[in-house]
Image (tube, grey):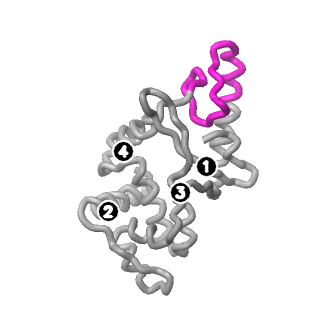
Amino acid sequence: MRWADLDLDAAELTITGSAATIDRKRVEGTTKGGRSRVVSIDAGTVEVMRADRKAQLAEQLAARTWWQDCDNLVFLRVDGAPLHTDTPTALMQRFVAQAGLPHTRLHDLRHLHATTLLLAGVPVHVVAARPGHADPSITLRATPTSCASRLEESPTSSPQPSTGDARQRYLNDLVLANALAKGS
């Protein structure tokens, strides 16, 4: 994510692609569907991002010659170099373990977010746009049975509950959401 992808005045983030490490090199690509999307961000996130940008610019000025120019990326190492693409995943695993929460992958937060919005009554077509699902039925297949059953009454939905390991991950997501809501 680059600072140009964030419009802090409008409280929006434009998601244009992804990054991975292949043969020890950072490789950037498009989103899975090849389309960019704009998602809203809350006021607290805007505040944090403004403070982070200010701190990052101060670090860059203080570093002078040893700061690495990395195309205006948001998340960097202390020397200005890009984070390794596996760093957020490793940090997520550490935070979840320290909090004593069920095993949760970073990618599971996409499903947790969608599940939370659906349980809050947000229309499925609105929820589907946030993770970039082209079809709301994709979103419904990625929600736990308890959430999907509540949506069966909706004339635009055709839920297909998850089973097996996937269902357990989503139930873990609900446990995680509950713990986060309680401030664990």
The first of marks 2 and 3 along the sequence is 3
Inter-mark Cα distance, 1 to 4: 28 Å
Q: Quadrant of residue 79?
A: top right
State which quadrant residue 10 falls in.
Answer: bottom right
Image: 85 above or below 178 = above
Q: Secondary structure at mark 3?
A: loop
- The alpha-carbon separation of the residues under discs 4 and 3 comes to 29 Å
Instruction: Choose mark 1 or mark 4, whichever is in front.
Output: 1
Q: Nearer the viewer, residue 86 or 119?
A: 86
Q: Which comes before the other along the chain, label 4 or label 2? A: 4
Q: Residues within 10 Å of mark 2 (few under 14, many from 20)?
A: some
Mark number displayed over residue 16: 1
Quick one: label 3 or label 1, which is nearer the N terminus? 1
According to the picture, the residue beneath numbered tag 2 turns out to be 171
Question: Where does residue 78 sit, x and y in percent of width and height?
Answer: 56, 23
- Camera-nearest label, 3 or 1: 3
Q: Residue at x 67, y 46 (%)?
A: 5
The mark that comes first in sequence, 1 or 2, is 1
What residue did someone put label 3 on? Answer: 33
Q: Are marks 4 and 2 in contact (CB under 8 Å)?
A: no
Residue 96 disc label: 4
Identify the residue at image location x=33%, y=72%: 161
Residue 30 got which mark? Answer: none
Cα–Cα gap, marks 2 and 3: 27 Å
* Closer to us: 13 or 160: 160
Residue 137 location, x and y as percent? 45, 73
Q: Amino acid at mark 4?
A: Val
Contact between marks 2 and 3 (CB within 8 A): the answer is no
